[in-house]
Image (cartoon, grey):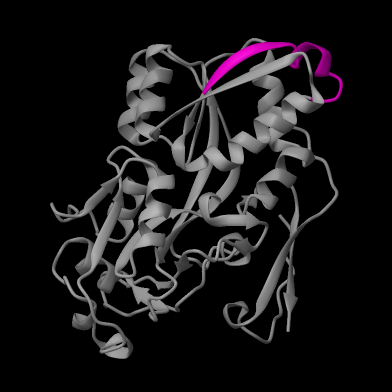
Amino acid sequence: MTMILNKKHSLHNKAALLALLSMFVLFSGCDYTTQKSVTTVGEITIGVDEGLLPVMSREASEFMRLNNEAKLNLTVKTSKEVIADLNSGVYKTVVVDRDLTKEEADIFAANKIELKKTKFALDGIGVIVNPKNPLTKLNFNELKRIFTGVQKDWKDLDGNNKDVYIGNIKVLIARKNASIHDIFREKVLAGVDFADYDLICSTSAQMMSEIKSSENAIGFISMAWITVSNDTLDTSVKPLKIASVDPKTEAVGDYVSLHQAYIANKSYPLITEAYIISSDFSMNVSVGFTSFLAAYDGQRIVLKSGLVPVTQPVRIIQLN
C-alpha cells in the first residue's frame, strides 16, 4: 500500500482524499483473467456479516453484472452466526468484519476444517450522534462511562465537554454477536459489559433510524453504513472525533475524525478488518468472487463504499 503524507504537518488537521492507484496484483498465485471461465459460472450462497452488507451488496451486483453466468446469494447474519454456519457447513464461504477469534480457530482445527482467508478491506467503527448534538469529540474513558451506564446525562461530561450539552443520554448498541459489538466492548469498554438498559439495535438500519430521530442518542456503526461515496458521509448522523486512552498511564491520545485516510494510516482508534473466508478449495465461483474482491474492480468498490482497500496500492492526497 502506497501513501503520500505531508512530512511537516499532522494529517489529523488536514483534509485528505484516498485514491486507488491503477495497478493489479495477483491473488494467491491465481490469475483472475485466465481462470475466469472456470470461476465465474454457477451459483453460491455467501454468509455476510450485517455490518458489511452495503459494500457486499455492491460487490456482488458488480460481479454478477460482469459475469452473467454467476449468481451470488447473500444471507445476512451477525459475524458469530455466519462463522458458526461456516463451521457446520451451512455456508462454504462467509464475509466478516473481523478475524477469527482463537476459540473459533481452535474449533475449526478440532473439526479438521481447513480454511482459506483473505483480508480485503479496513473498516472503521464510527461513534455517531444526532447532528443537533453540539459535541464533537469523546475519548475512550468518556465512552466507557456512557456505555456502561456510569453517566446518564450529557451534562455530566467533564473537561472540554462540560456543560456543552444537557439531556438524558439515550444509549444504543449493536446486538450481541455482531462484530462491532464485540470489538467496541473489547477496545473501548476494556471487556466490561454494556449497561443493562442500553437499547439494542438488531440492525444497522435501525441504529441509523434511532440516531436520526433522537437528539440525545449515541451509538456506534460500521463506516460502510454511513458512507454516501468515498469520503463523503451521510449528514443525517454525526460521527464524533475519538481518542484512545492508554490503560497504564491514562494519557489521552489525539482526537481523530472518522475518515478513510485516518483508517488507512491507522491513526483512527477503532479499526476493523474485513475478510472473506472459505472452506471450499474447488475451482468455482467462490474463488472467482474472492479474486474479484482482491483485484482492482473489487477494491475500487471498497474505496467507493468508504472502506480502505488492502490488496491494491492507495495514495493519501492531502488537501491544504
Q: Position of residue 45 (x, y in %)?
A: 55, 17
Decide if residue 212 is in sight here.
yes
Q: Position of residue 49 (x, y in %)?
A: 46, 35
Specify the segment rendered in magenta.
31-46
Q: Residue at x 71, y 22 (%)?
A: 288
Q: Is residue 233 above or below residue 253?
A: above
Left or right position of 203 against 7: left
Q: Position of residue 70 (x, y in %)?
A: 72, 16
Q: Position of residue 205 (x, y in %)?
A: 44, 46
Left or right position of 150 against 232: left
Left or right position of 163 against 255: left
Which quadrant is the C terminus positioned in? bottom right
Q: Which is nearer the eye, 263 or 239? A: 239
Q: Residue at x 16, y 72 (%)?
A: 151
Residue 238: in magenta span: no
Displayed quadrant of residue 259: bottom right
Q: Residue at x 78, y 39 (%)?
A: 297
Q: Which is nearer the eye, 8 or 197? A: 197
Which quadrant is the N terminus positioned in? bottom right
Q: Is residue 119 above or below residue 76?
A: below
Tally the numbered discs: 0
